[in-house]
Image (cartoon, rainbow, N blue to C red):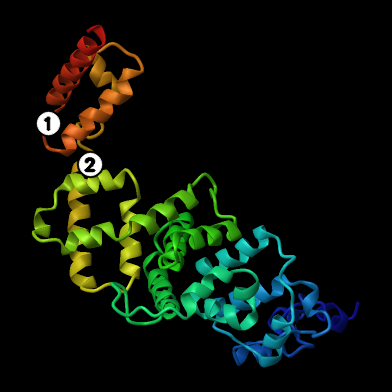
Amino acid sequence: MSFQDAVSRRDFTINAILQDPLTRTIIDPCQGVSDLKSKKLRAVNSRTFREDSLRVLRAAQLSARYGLTISAETILLCQQTSLKDIPRERIYAEFEKLLLLAPRPSVGLSYFSTLGITTQIFPMLWDLYSSPMNNSLYSKDSLWNYTLKSIDKGKTLVKQLSEPEQLSVLISVLGIRLALPRFLELLDRLGIYSRRGYKLREQIISLTTLHLLPYKLFFQPGREKVENGVFLRLEKLVDLKLMSYLLRSLHLDHSNEFSSWLDEKLKILDSIKNDPCLKPKGRSLLKAGIPPGPHMKSLLNQVRELAIENRISSLDQAQQAASALYKRKSKAIES
């Protein structure tokens, strides 16, 4: 093939730039360098563009990743392209790149409706476009604009987290104002379950369903007296570190004061959650004279609850409590 024939099969002009490896001369039959300098995303060939429908998703992803404006003619090509044949795995791959690689994912998400992505792939997102947020805990903006602002704010906060943790927070932001059935449709459409052993779907659902609990605790009378046990129990249901990032991403009332209060609570939690009473081991019960068996798990959970309620404060007390609980249970069985 000639260079012209070869690059004519590419998707966008910025991806149709060649370089001679010997002379390092740039070969640019489609004027991709010019488009890159002017921050424009333009299709190479109107006749072949629609042969790969994934290019529509790539247009949204690349626009966000590199801060590009999609040309009018390319937008028209995208609108004329059917997306029904794209496998779920490829949809998720582009969606993941949009969230993880773009400094401002809102740029790509803003193109979803314009390019036909919302209508054909993510119809559940229409629920956010026209819904107002008046008299809401979150914002007086529309749900969609609020989501875009929040996801960009979240992206600036989660950089030090692992990729699965980043996705947990950012996808939760996207679905936080969707009704649960619609949010589950979104997760199904993306095929979100586990990711490299990380329970991504489980974590996202926990974050979205429980995220307002700390916020409500903050506003209750006497919030400084909220017991640590409340957070210790909540930690059994959701990753509180990720919940903190999620809540910081949202535009909540009194957000600075709330963040400081939550930070303090999490510091206290970190200092006490490794207490042996909160993490009793089976061998500690054996030392108390309790024989091994299936009853161990139940006893360990009961001892942990006593520690959470501050009814025991040492390993000796934990062993004594476990022994008393076991004797009580044994007598009940005998009788």
Query: Residue 293 versus residue 93: which sits nearer the camera?
Result: 293
Q: Secondary structure at mark 1?
A: loop
214 sits to left or right of 157: left
Quarter of the figure with the N terminus: bottom right
Please tell me how crowded label 2 is: few (under 14), some (14-19), or many (20+) other residues with Cα within 10 Å. some
Query: What percent of the width, then of the height, locates residue 49?
Result: 78, 79
Quickly name the residue at label 2: 273
Label annotation for residue 184: none
Q: Eyeballing the image, is 3 above or below 91?
A: below
Q: Eyeballing the image, is 133 above or below 237?
A: below
Q: Which of the 4 image quarters holds residue 13?
A: bottom right
Quickly name the residue at label 1: 312
Residue drawn at the location 64% of the way across and 64% of the way down: 91
Quarter of the figure with the C terminus: top left
Residue drawn at the location 54% of the way across and 50% of the way down: 193
Q: Nearer the viewer, mark 2 or mark 1?
A: 1
